[in-house]
Image (tube, rainbow, N blue to C red):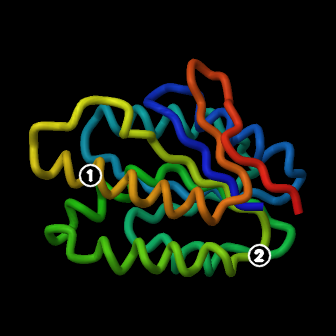
Amino acid sequence: MRSLILGGVRSGKTRHAQSLAEASGLLVSYVATAQAGDGEMASRIAHHRASRPVNWQLVEEPLALASTLRAVAAPGRCILVDCLTLWLTNLLLFENGSRLAAERDALLATLPTLPGEIILVSNETGLGVVPLGELTRRYCDEAGWLHQALAAQCERVVFTVAGLPMVLKEVTR
């Protein structure tokens, strides 16, 4: 099963994704896309690390997500990716976004081929006003397009608000 868990900042999306991973009963690999560029982000990363079970495998990859997923995915394994919008930010800021299209396309091509359970976490950015800056508008546009494409591929799509998961899509096999 492929799951996309969306929500705003501190909406409970990661906690919900972690509960799905634990409930799967599978070996879990946690793919973290964040980079500690400052002290506040380092604190966020430390908080996330402390909230995860110690027996989960940790893979840190800020850019090459599709190739990382191909390397880690296996039958009987659950992969939790947290978070796609940080991954998008990394790609937008890396070499003026030159790798974004190729990495996004690789993720969308790879996702349907992966064995095991895949849980993707991402921030929903499309509920606010149109941002003033060009880079921020591009970020919101890229996130929205990515979420639409992933939602089409995933069997489960959940939107979290105030710690409450709302199932938007659930296709049983």
Position of residue 100 relative to residue 141, above or below, is below
In the rendered image of this protein, does residue 126 appear above or below residue 118? Answer: above
Quadrant occupied by the N terminus: bottom right
Q: Residue at x 75, y 57 (%)?
A: 28
The disc at residue 139 is: 1
Work out whether mark 1 precedes mark 2 in sequence or the reverse, and give the earlier one: 2
Q: Tell me the residue at 61%/73% (across/down).
A: 111
The amino acid on which the numbered mark 1 sits, given as a three-letter code, is Tyr
Q: As drawn, is 53 to the left or to the right of 128?
A: right
The furthest residue to the left: 133
Q: Position of residue 157 (x, y in %)?
A: 65, 47
Circle 1 packing at 10 Å, graded few (<14), some (14-19), many (20+), is some
**Secondary structure under the numbered disc 1 in the rendered image:** helix
Secondary-structure class at tag 2: loop
| 1 vs 2, front mark | 1
Nearer to us in this view, 125 or 91:
125
Most extreme residue toward the top is 162
Label drawn at residue 115 = 2
Q: Residue 18's spot in the image, x, y percent?
A: 70, 41
Residue displayed at 68% across by 30% down: 165
Task: Tell me if label 1 and label 2 are in contact, CB under 8 Å.
Answer: no
Residue at image position (28%, 35%) is 39
Q: Position of residue 72 (x, y in %)?
A: 66, 74
Q: Nearer the viewer, residue 107 or 147?
A: 147
